[in-house]
Image (cartoon, grey):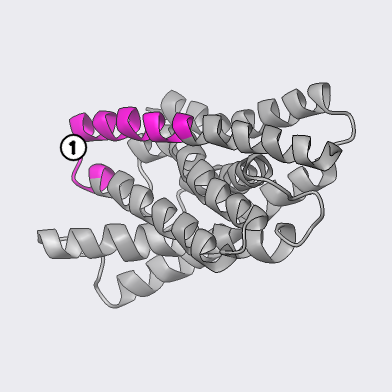
Amino acid sequence: MEILKFVSFFIPPLIAFFIYIYLRYRFRQWAFSLLVKAFIWGAISIVLVLAVQILASYFDLDRLSNLRRILFYSLVVSAFFAELGKFFFLKVFIYPREEFKTPVDGIIFAVMISMGFATMNNLLYFINIPNLTVNIPNALTAGPANVIFGVLLGFFIGLGKLRKMRYIDSMTGLIAAVFFHALYSFCLITSDYKLLWAFFIGSSVVVLSLCVAALRIHSEAKTEERK
């Protein structure tokens, strides 16, 4: 169990590290300092979740005695405030930058923010901080799951940067990330690991489709720039 706990801590930062190294190798002029900042902002964003979970504990909302309480906790306490924190840092600190142009940029920055969040999530679990709802399955899957949430959030926010419907696209990204995060949290809270596998398989198909679409849009945008 201690080995799994130790291994789980390194999964999100390793994902972030490989993204950084790949982009550094492929694109010399990319905004690498902004990637590092995105990771740090993601780590900071967990403060909101921790505060909400402490409040939920104070008001006895973490006593998950029936399905309604589980659904509320999964959707509001776990999912909404986690994704709202990431959304805030992405929209306020990265979205206005000129480096943020297409859904591909949105995905990269949102995933880096999500990896910062997941790293801090696992670090707090590693040091056994109270009031944070994390366990071994959560810690082991936090990295891959937050990649999924990051792609959903970043794709639609990046799409909004290219279109006039920025508010609608941004809200679509936030709602999609919250919905998938809530499904993930529900699987963990109910310890339904077969459903968790189904969640990862289904959401991976969705995320891969969005990544392909993002690359196509990015290519088209670059072609338009050259004209």
Q: Quadrant of residue 222?
A: top right
Q: Is residue 82 visible?
A: no
Which residue: 35% across, 42% down?
135
The crowd level at tag 1 (other Cα within 10 Å; few <14, some 14-19, many 20+) is few
Q: Is residue 189 magenta?
A: yes
Q: Main secondary structure of the magenta part?
A: helix
Element type at mark 1 = loop
Above-or-below relation of 125 to 164: above
Asked where in the image residue 62 lies, by quadrant, the reply is bottom left
Q: Which residue is mark 1?
A: 192
* Residue 124 rendering spot, x and y as whole percentages: 51, 49
| Horizontal and vertical percent position of residue 173 | 48, 55
Q: Is residue 32 left or right of residue 167?
A: right
- Quarter placement of the C terminus: top right
Q: Position of residue 171 (x, y in %)?
A: 48, 64
Q: Is residue 185 left or right of residue 219?
A: left
Residue at the right extreme?
29
Q: Which residues are magenta?
A: 187-209
